[in-house]
Amino acid sequence: MTLEAQIDALERLAALDAQLKELEDELSRERDALSGKQTHLAALDTKLSASQKSVSEMEKVRNDLMQELRQMSLQIDRSREKLSRVRTEREANAVQRELEELRKLYRDRELEIEKLTALVDQARSEIESTEGEQQELSAELGQTSNEVESRLGGVEKQAAEKYDARKKIVSEIQPTLYRRYELVRKRKGTAIAFTVEGTCSECHMLLPPMMFQKLMRSEEFGQCPSCHRILYFRPSAPAEDGAEAQDTQSSGA
């Protein structure tokens, strides 16, 4: 196979690889966006479940405290009744101390209940906000997931067709040259470069004169000493006919 045929195959392969990269990047973006929303929805579900469990536990504690408060209220009433029946100062002092302790405990429980009520209200507000976000995201996913899956299917089909075309092009390239191409492509993203007037088309570094002279003979591929891409000589494009005609008219004038 001639060098020109290998150059043509490499150029077609490089163009196809660039298209495949764009398709793969598009697939990655679409999948990441969909996965991100699904992950966020799952996180909202977990958060909502944890918040609801927390509210349930706090309400249970609050109910227990309120039950305890009712019992203490009965104890206070009994102590007051006992105080009305005491006959000695010593008994009165004892009942008074008992009443003071009960009242203090009662106030402490009331404060605990107030704090729990505030926490429950705050948690319920957060639950309401989370439920709103969850419903909004769930609806968005329901509306767009089919559309996204359809787009993904279309892009995947395009990519599959191009991979089939790629296999055909690869079969036209010498195996050792293809292995070299793949090695450079995986490191650099692009594997081939050309030179017209002695500089690399990819890294724009000036080539050694001897290398440029050798490449101009178009006998074999070279390797850019700077970026290490596969390098070949591309002759300058001939002047366009329109430009030549314009030059002729200018000369005649």
Image: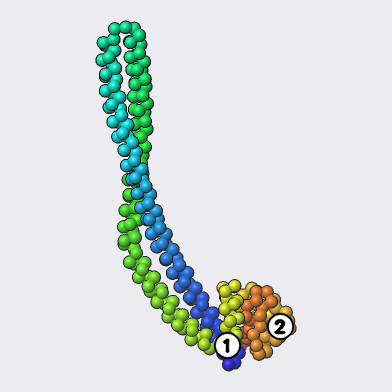
In percent of width and height, residue 65 lies at 32, 31
Please identify the quadrant where the C terminus is shown: bottom right
Please identify the quadrant where the N terminus is shown: bottom right
Q: Classify mark 2: helix, strand or loop.
A: helix
User: Where 111 sits versus 235, above or below?
Assistant: above
User: Where 68 sits versus 252, above or below?
Assistant: above
The residue wearing badge 1 is 174
In percent of width and height, residue 120 lies at 34, 38
User: Where 73 sits versus 198, above or below?
Assistant: above
Q: Nearer the viewer, residue 98 or 127?
A: 98
- Find the distance from the CA under tag 1 to the CA under tag 2: 23 Å
**Which residue is located at x 45 percent, y 82 percent?**
164
**Which residue is located at x 67 percent, y 87 percent?**
216
- Residue 9: quarter of image: bottom right
Res. 240 visible in picture? no
**Which residue is located at x 36 percent, y 67 percent?**
148
**Which residue is located at x 54 percent, y 79 percent?**
14
Res. 79 visible in picture? yes
Q: Earlier in the sequence, mark 1 or mark 2?
A: 1
Q: Residues within 10 Å of mark 2 (few under 14, many from 20)?
A: some
Q: Nearer the viewer, residue 59 or 26?
A: 59
Q: Amino acid at mark 1?
A: Gln
The residue wearing badge 2 is 211
Going by the picture, which residue comes out furthest to the bottom? Answer: 1
